[in-house]
Amino acid sequence: MGQARVNEHGKILILATESCAYPGADSVGQAHASYPPNTYILKVKAPVLFPEQFYLDCFKKGIGGIIIMSCGEECPYEGAYKAMAQRLDNIYALMKEQGLDIRRLRLTAICTVCNRAFLNEVNQMNQVIEELDQPAQA
């Protein structure tokens, strides 16, 4: 893989589910692939546990983009993925009210060995935050 570009416009926060997406992120490292160093991965049980305000606070504190990487419909917590997708609609509405581009927040399913999909998501988010101004600081 080629050298990843550094994005000076903001950090990417990844909420990676411990049962699927986090092992997927680990497989990227095992494959010796690289991704931008402005990427921070937080291992979580289920992203639905985070309240709507969490995402808005992240943007206020300088996070340029957030990728919620989950197991998708294969989530071990029944109904969690569907609940997260519904919550995302509420978060998008709040983001619009605050003048935040909704492309800064994305929900995706990543499996335990999906290193190409992981890299693609990170690189796409990096491009989005390069195009947008840094979110307004609180």
Image (tube, rainbow, N blue to C red):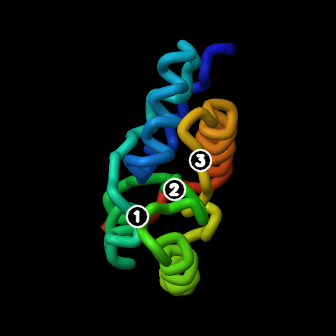
- The dot on residue 110 is 3
Which residue is denoted by mark 1 in the rendering?
47
Instruction: Please state which amino acid type lies under the numbered disc 3.
Output: Ile
Are the two marked residues, 2 and 3, in contact with CB atoms closer than 8 angstroms? yes
Nearer-the-camera pick, 134 or 27: 27
**Compared to 107, does 123 lie above or below?**
above
Asked whether residue 92 is in view, the answer is no
Classify mark 1: helix, strand or loop: helix
Q: Earlier along the polypeptide chain: callout 2 or callout 3?
A: 2
Q: Is residue 124 left or right of residue 30?
A: right
- The dot on residue 70 is 2
Q: Earlier along the polypeptide chain: callout 2 or callout 1?
A: 1
Classify mark 3: helix, strand or loop: loop
Q: Residue at x 40, y 71 (%)?
A: 48
Classify mark 2: helix, strand or loop: strand
Mark 3 crowdedness (10 Å alpha carbons): few <14, some 14-19, many ≥20: many
Asked whether residue 3 is in view, the answer is yes
Q: Residue at x 50, y 62 (%)?
A: 75
Q: Residue at x 52, y 36 (%)?
A: 24
The quarter in which the N terminus is drawn is top right
Instruction: Please state which amino acid type lies under the numbered disc 1.
Output: Pro
